[in-house]
Image (cartoon, rainbow, N blue to C red):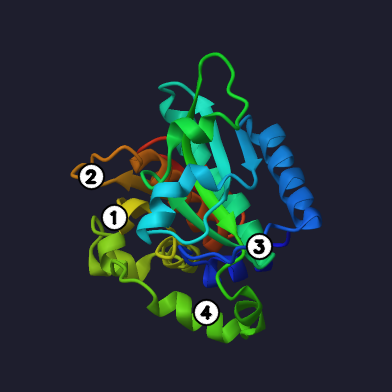
Amino acid sequence: MEHTQLIDAVNIRTAVRAYDNEPIDDDTARQLSMTLDAINTLAGTHMQLVLNQPKVFAAANESGHLTNAANYIALVEPNDDLEARERAGFYAERAVLTATLRGLGTLWVGGSWDRDEAARHCRIEHGEELYLCVVIGYPEHHLSYQAKSYDELVEFQRSHRPTKTFAQFTAEMSDTERAAAPDWFTAGVETAMKAPSAMNKQPVTFTYDAVTDSAIARLDPRETYRETLNDLGIAKLHFQIGAGTGEWTWGDGGRFTRK
């Protein structure tokens, strides 16, 4: 997938809670599974596509928190492996953006599902756990959604939720340092501002280090919820897409070096 396509996906991706009651077609499901297989091989992850299991989301569907949720990408990772949780966020969000470009809606969920029921439909090896899942499917009224122009989808993404400001995302930098930072850093932060996060907490901040010409990603120490490392991985991916070619080191305080 070309870099410009990933930027397009970031610009139109939103959290989708309502889905059409229609199965994902066989060809799209096969392509998604192939994407996950490729990512798993590359990254050493164990993501799995599970289809047509509405019982996993029965309570959320009944309450109206979700509508017609039935399919999910399962993030199966090693128990208590902090780096694996970050990598899961990074690489599963890569799959999410691929699904977005195919006209599918997605939603990261931490609590609106039956974890035990979901695990029954996964391949979980010894020493692994079902960590999180991403709901996936056709957005409600998806034919109308797919008929919208790119500009319309971008505008909806821009206005559909509140977001922290650029200054808040670079809270450890002064105005002078922000102005002096290279364009790639600014583009990376602006792309990370569009990343999903648990409860829309947006717990990641970025700093430009002029001495090493690198970026540093840090978690807000005040945010202690379970999914912070997952959110760190997602934010790092978005930053990397915006900044262009480069590579992160893992962990809180990891560095991005542009290549």
In the rendered structure, which amino acid carries the disc numbered 2? Glu
Q: Secondary structure at mark 3?
A: loop
Which mark is on residue 154?
Answer: 4
Earlier in the chain: of badge 3 and badge 2, it is 3
Residue 259 can be seen, yes or no: no
- In whole angstroms, how far apart are the C-alphas of marks 4 and 2? 29 Å
Left or right for 173, reference 68:
left
Indicate the position of residue 44 as horizontal and vertical percent values: 63, 29
Q: Examine the rendered structure and indicate whether residue 14 appears above or below residue 201.
A: below
Indicate the position of residue 35 as horizontal and vertical percent values: 72, 47
Q: Secondary structure at mark 4?
A: helix
* Pointer 2 with pointer 1, Cβ within 8 A: yes
Q: Residues within 10 Å of mark 2 (few under 14, many from 20)?
A: few
Earlier in the chain: of badge 1 and badge 4, it is 4
Left or right for 70, reference 225:
right
Q: Nearer the viewer, residue 201 or 191?
A: 201
Q: Secondary structure at mark 1?
A: loop
